[in-house]
Amino acid sequence: MRMAITLREARRALAANKVRTFLTMLGIIVGITSLTIIVAVGQGSKAQVTGRLSKLWGTNPIMVTASAGGKNAGPHMGMGVGVGSQTLTYEDTEAIRKEVPNVRAASPGLLKGDVQVKYRQQSATTEVFGVTPEFREYRSWDVDSGEFVSEEDVRGLARVVLLGQTVARELFGEADPVGETVRIENVAFKVKGMMAKKGASPEGGDLDDRVTIPVTTFARRLYNVTYLSNIVVQLEDMSRMQETAQAITRLLRERHHIVPPKQDDFGVRTPEGMVKVFAGTAQTLSLFLGLVSGIALLVGGLVIMNIMLVSVGERTREIGLRRAMGARRRDILTQFLTEALVVSVSGGVIGTALGILGTLLVRVATKTPAVVSWQAVGLSAFFSITIGVVFGVHPARRAAFLDPVEALRTE
Amino acid sequence: MMIEMQEVTRVYDMGGQQVRAVNGISLQVEAGEFVAIIGPSGSGKSTLMNLLACLDTPTSGRYHLDGMEVGGLDDDRLSLVRNSKVGLVFQSYNLLSRMTALENVELPLLYGEHRGDGAAARQALESVGLGDRLHHWPNQLSGGQQQRVAIARALINGPAIVLADEPTGALDTRSGLEVMDIFQRLNREGRTVVLVTHEQAIAEHAGRVISIRDGRIAADEAVPRPRSAREELAHLPQEVSQ
């Protein structure tokens, strides 16, 4: 009841000078609007990155790579043949499959970049992947036409290849390559199928610029290597991913005789970790825009503080009268703090509404998958209330600590 | 005893110089008295009035209001005393422009311990003859009407004393007399009224006049036959406007 009267008074006091009240709100409105859009765009691009990553990465397996990765995680994540270390082996694959709990399957993989593929007079430089049939499921490598690498192909070191869309276009144009013969490093391969289009990778690479052959053919017929580029590990229980990743790390350190301070000669990557790496750029952008909205909110808060100080000055006599009528200091404090809060929260509400509108505009204009979430709205509410309190306290305290006699004497 | 002051002083520090605005005043007012405090400007009567209203506290001396020592109270308790025991009326009415007459009268309820219902404020306004102006804004009321709203506001919490500081100072003769008539009626009904003024003619409506000079009581005399505001109003020539 008392609060209702305080609110009514705040509303009337603010309504008495509408233009000033609006200008007071302006900073908050700008700040909250940009904040809402930033959070929406930030979350949208994170969802987009995660989506793209699962396309690239498949159904969230753990990947063991033949280098510690991290800093040199380039397009091949530092694991191509001749790039990474040469210590990851088929035996490691077997050991992971048999000894680490929660592992459903582990498949060996090889890859090499800058490989020449030729068809008659046409040639293309691309990446070659040596895989097992499981890769199709694990990494969401769909086949557009023809068939994927089979169990028999792997066992028989078959010279069969699946072309990515970019490679196929470069070599065959619009013609259907299935059944034709191409030469990889001068070894003849029969085109068994075409990979489905995958688009761009999060860092801008072309995921369709690659060819896929059986891992055994890669290792013995093409390059004669005994080591692996990577091992893809499938789990029974996804929720235990981190502990399984740690168990794999322990096992491989043991097998590779790695004792600190010696560095790991392999890397164990989980999708969560990758999301963080790829979301980095989006985060930098968000941080910058966040700074902008932070400054707008700060300025908005300072404007509220200044206008409230002016208002306290103008209403000194009213404050004196209220004190004479028995208002305690905290009653006056509450009154002016309520006014500051009504301004900042109203600004917040308007800002959030404009922010939602702005998000829709951004989505239409830039095709960014911006999503307005409860986090964005919650953050706006939090900031507008905080600013009202933080910047309202000083004027409210000044009002509360006026001397009643002096205040009543003011004209 | 409603008001009991003993050797009260109030010293201001004005740029290093000590100013004794109230310089040892002892004063007793019985419940139900109508007292006028009179003195020229600078005599210390405003300071005395602020002390009586609990807006200010004495530098030294003791002040009992309605049996309660006011001197040592903290700001919150002092606020509560103002709210519950003192009904203040000012020269310039001091109504809040964004509130209706009724809301202005209800203002002290906002800060009090007990909450009245709308009926109390309505009755208070009716008792000062403004039953038909409840929802008017202050700027829709004449000066006399505004001062009557202020009196209704002073009465809303049933105060021990009504303190009026030059209540007729901004009013024409008729409105001023109407206001004085209300004070006299309140006093007849048993209310203790203290009036601060610099006009002898206004002071003579009280039953006792205390003269202040240089921060001290210069004279304290009973008025043998107080003026009656009602009779004066009856003898006033009729005016066209209200």
Image (tube, rainbow, N blue to C red):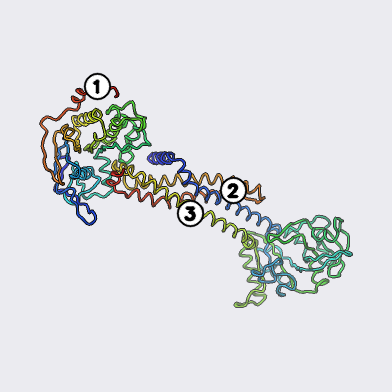
Amino acid type indicated by mark 2: Val
- Mark 1 crowd level (few <14, some 14–19, many ≥20, 10 Å Cα): few
Residue A298: numbered disc: 3
Calculate the distance from the C-alpha at mark 1 to the C-alpha at mark 3.
Answer: 64 Å
Q: Which is more N-terminal, label 3 or label 2?
A: 3
Position in image of residue A376 (x %, y %): 55, 50
Q: Residue at x 66, y 54 (%)?
A: A48
Position in image of residue B166 (x %, y %): 23, 37
Amino acid type indicated by mark 3: Leu
Q: Nearer the viewer, residue A48 or A391?
A: A391
Q: Residue at x 47, y 42 (%)?
A: A19
In this image, A15 relative to B50: left or right?
A: right
In this image, A53 relative to B135: left or right?
A: right
- Mark 3 crowd level (few <14, some 14–19, many ≥20, 10 Å Cα): some
Residue A372: numbered disc: 2
Q: Chain of mark 2?
A: A
Instruction: State whether discs 2 and 1 lie on one chain.
Output: no
- The secondary structure type at the circle numbered 1 is loop
Amino acid type indicated by mark 1: Gln
- The secondary structure type at the circle numbered 3 is helix
- The secondary structure type at the circle numbered 2 is loop
Position in image of residue A81 (x %, y %): 75, 71
Above or below, A158 relative to B216: below
- Of circles 1 and 3, the one toward us is 1
Q: Chain of mark 1?
A: B
Residue B238: numbered disc: 1
In this image, B62 relative to A59: left or right?
A: left
- Of circles 2 and 1, the one toward us is 1
- Mark 2 crowd level (few <14, some 14–19, many ≥20, 10 Å Cα): many
